[in-house]
Image (tube, grey):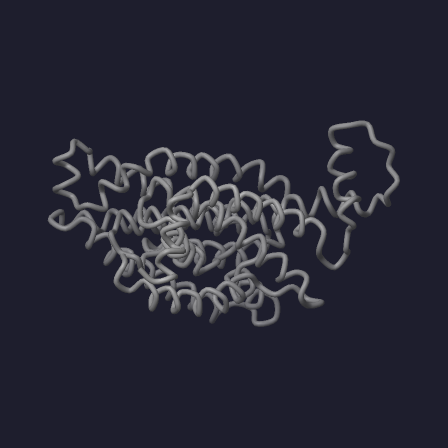
């Protein structure tokens, strides 16, 4: 056994230690996210301002810092935690369901549908709240169309779902391209393009109050049924032989992952690679067992997106869209993981 295999086995045999390490990493990344930005806030001031919401503390800091922390950075932090963890756990659940390591949460066309909804809202309303509502509704509509189309042939439901998702996604993407072509090139076109590149810039306390509980419920359900995903990964016939209602579990996974993805796209735009890459990193640490994999990717995904968002709004004077950074970081990592784990899936 070589040194890398020994190290990997040691990590997989200590899930509690790994969980503690990931939680500590998440806390460090969250604190850095609250500190860093165009306006730097001292760590002690961050602690004081947060504690002032619970305890009567004398305000020795400028009101601007409190407004930035509570109205801008905390909602953005919560959005990053939910979107990162939601896309990661959805990707891991879909990869187990479809028994394919190349599947992402957007495989059923949710991102293409949400993109079309956002483009329509920008063209006809120009309001950020209507953009979020339309992107959410059209994301769900795209998955509904995918599922309806896949019911034409019932012999291979998994294969038909994937093929139907490709068809519906292509149709919605083509319609979005048409809307870009007819949009105003000065105002509407840049808004559509920037929104589709992904950003947490528009996250607010209102968004977290509405979308947050829905996403947390979806993540919790996937975590609760994660051991059944192991059975589905064995195949339809084997899972049925063990007494699992495969149709019901598959529907629950698809509904939860779709709602999570639609909510994520509605508040942050289209952010790729997270649901594809993070599950592979989790398998590298704990193996393919979904009972350990889903909690691990939830923590890793949350830390990763918050860290990327912090870099996106701190590295330059103007904010970099998150989708650009996740693609630039995710593609090389994914290539390395495929080369390293090509025989371990």
Q: Left or right of 66: which side holds 229?
A: left
* Residue at position x 27%, y 58% in the image: 344
Instruction: Tell me residue 23's x, y (percent).
Output: 54, 43
Quarter residue 111 falls in: bottom left
Q: Left or right of 62: which side holds 268?
A: left
Q: Answer whether residue 76 is visible to the viewer in this image.
A: no
* Residue at position x 55%, y 68% in the image: 189
Instruction: Tell me residue 18's x, y (percent).
Output: 47, 45
Instruction: Tell me residue 230's x, y (percent).
Output: 26, 42
For the C terminus, the quadrant is bottom left
Q: Answer whether residue 131 is visible to the viewer in this image.
A: yes
For the N terminus, the quadrant is bottom left
Q: Left or right of 179: which side holds 1?
A: left
Q: Is residue 169 above or below residue 189?
A: above
Instruction: Tell me residue 122's x, y (percent).
Output: 54, 57
Which residue is nearer to you in this view: 281 or 319?
A: 281
Q: Is residue 314 above or below residue 260?
A: below
* Residue at position x 39%, y 53% in the image: 279
Quarter residue 321 falls in: bottom right
Which residue is nearer to you in this view: 260 or 52?
A: 52
Quarter residue 295 falls in: top left
Q: Is residue 119 above or below residue 71?
A: below
């Amino acid at each position: 056994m070589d040194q890398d295999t020994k190290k990997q086995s040691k990590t997989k045999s200590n899930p509690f230690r790994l969980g503690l390490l990931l939680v500590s990493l998440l806390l460090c990344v969250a604190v850095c996210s609250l500190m860093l930005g165009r306006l730097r806030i001292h760590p002690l001031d961050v602690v004081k301002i947060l504690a002032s919401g619970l305890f009567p503390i004398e305000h020795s800091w400028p009101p601007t810092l409190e407004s930035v922390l509570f109205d801008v950075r905390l909602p953005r932090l919560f959005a990053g935690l939910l979107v990162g963890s939601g896309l990661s756990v959805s990707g891991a659940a879909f990869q187990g369901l479809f028994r394919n390591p190349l599947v992402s949460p957007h495989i059923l066309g949710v991102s293409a549908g949400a993109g079309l909804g956002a483009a329509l809202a920008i063209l006809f309303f120009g309001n950020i709240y209507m953009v979020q509502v339309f992107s959410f509704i059209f994301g769900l509509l795209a998955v509904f169309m995918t599922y309806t189309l896949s019911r034409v042939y019932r012999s291979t439901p998994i294969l038909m779902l994937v093929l139907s998702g490709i068809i519906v996604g292509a149709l919605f993407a083509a319609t979005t391209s048409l809307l870009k072509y007819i949009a105003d090139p000065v105002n509407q076109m840049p808004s559509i393009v920037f929104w589709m590149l992904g950003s947490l810039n528009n996250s607010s306390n209102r968004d977290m109050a509405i979308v947050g509980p829905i996403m947390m419920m979806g993540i919790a359900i996937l975590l609760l049924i994660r051991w059944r995903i192991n059975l589905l990964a064995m195949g339809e016939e084997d899972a049925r032989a063990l007494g699992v209602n495969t149709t019901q579990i598959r529907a629950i996974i698809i509904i939860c992952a779709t709602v999570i993805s639609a909510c994520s796209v509605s508040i942050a735009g289209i952010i790729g690679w997270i649901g594809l890459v993070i599950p592979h990193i989790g398998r590298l640490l704990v193996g393919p067992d979904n009972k350990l994999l889903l909690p691990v990717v939830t923590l890793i995904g949350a830390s990763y997106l918050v860290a990327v968002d912090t870099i996106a709004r701190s590295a330059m004077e103007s904010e970099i869209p998150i989708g650009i950074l996740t693609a630039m970081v995710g593609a090389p990592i994914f290539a390395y993981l495929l080369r390293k784990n090509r025989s371990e899936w």
